[in-house]
Amino acid sequence: MSNFLTKISSQPAAIQCAFWCLISNVLLVFQLAVVRLIADEINVFEIVFFRSLFSLIFVVPLLTKNARVLLHPNRLGIMILCGALAFVANVCFYFAAKYLPLADITAIHFTRPIFAAILAALILKETLKGARIIAICAGCIGAAIIIRPGIVELNIGILFVFGVVAAQTWNPINRRLLALSEHPDALAVWNPLCIIPLALLPTIFVWTTPSMELLAWMALIGALEMLNQRVLARAYIHGEAVVVLALHYTRLPIAAVLGFLMFGDVPEVWIWVGGGVIIAGSFFLAYKEAKSEKTRTTNAAQ
């Protein structure tokens, strides 16, 4: 494994970003799948609470090695804001998983990069041109093909996904800012630290004593979330916010396959048509970014 990671670290930044984004997408989709398995047995707020509690337990080894750095971020306000937004997004995401197939959630969630990419251009001064515009447009078109607004019947889960979109629009900006000043594992520590007290209050009112099986599932969700935070932080180190957002589109086929294997959800043909458009745009972006970086490196060497 160490040899493989060493090989990945020797690749251009855009390729490293794409790799970490792909791993993050697998972790997130599988996490939603587990939530869907248990959401009828235990309240979503309680799932979020236990998930964050287990996530914090799992990062204890990181704290014992590097507590001084991880517990004292340079941008504490942004770190706390990230955690608060993550709480809202998690609650909405998990409620959505209760009502919608994984592929549908993923497709609707693709509306987020449209707004976040614009904010990245305005606040982080990242450029929106060429391959980036093509990738974002491809994502919009592909998502529209899948969602078919005005044709598909409204499901309350759709509203929860848009709640995720609203909460997460700022977080790519926050993550990119934190990637410039913080240790990549800091967010994996601070997210559960912020979410636990926020989730505890509603959990008190909906408390159900979980069985050992439910605790095991929620521990798994916590482990997946902790790993996802660490992986995603590395994606933002190697790619600008716009690039990371566009590469999130690869989540769709992962969600479609996992939804079919675990729940028998058969994606409609429109999901594959739209997904094809989205994936083409994403890989085109990764190719162009890698080529552009190689050209800049060559010119700098000369």
Image: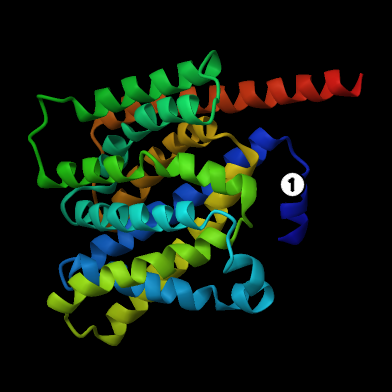
State the quadrant of the C terminus. Answer: top right
User: Colour scheme of this structure image?
Assistant: rainbow
The answer to whether one can see residue 20 in this image is: no
> What amino acid is at disc 1?
Ser
| Image vertical order of residue 99 relative to residue 185, above or below | above
**Residue at (75% x, 60% y) in the render:** 2
> In the image shown, does 275 or 41 lie closer to the viewer?
41
**Residue at (26% x, 43% y) in the render:** 105
The answer to whether one can see residue 172 in this image is: yes
| Image vertical order of residue 226 relative to residue 92, above or below | below
**Residue at (18% x, 25% y) in the render:** 148
User: Badge 1 is on which residue?
Assistant: 9
x%, y% of residue 193?
Answer: 43, 69
Instruction: Judge left or right: residue 198 versus residue 175.
Output: left
x%, y% of residue 176?
Answer: 54, 42
State the quadrant of the N terminus. Answer: bottom right
x%, y% of residue 59?
Answer: 54, 73
Regarding mark 1 in the picture, which secondary structure is present there? helix
| Image vertical order of residue 180 relative to residue 241, above or below | below
**Residue at (47% x, 39% y) in the render:** 173
> In the image shown, does 54 or 127 lie closer to the viewer?
127
x%, y% of residue 60?
Answer: 55, 78
> In the image shown, does 26 or 108 lie closer to the viewer?
108
Instruction: Judge left or right: residue 183 versus residue 301.
Output: left
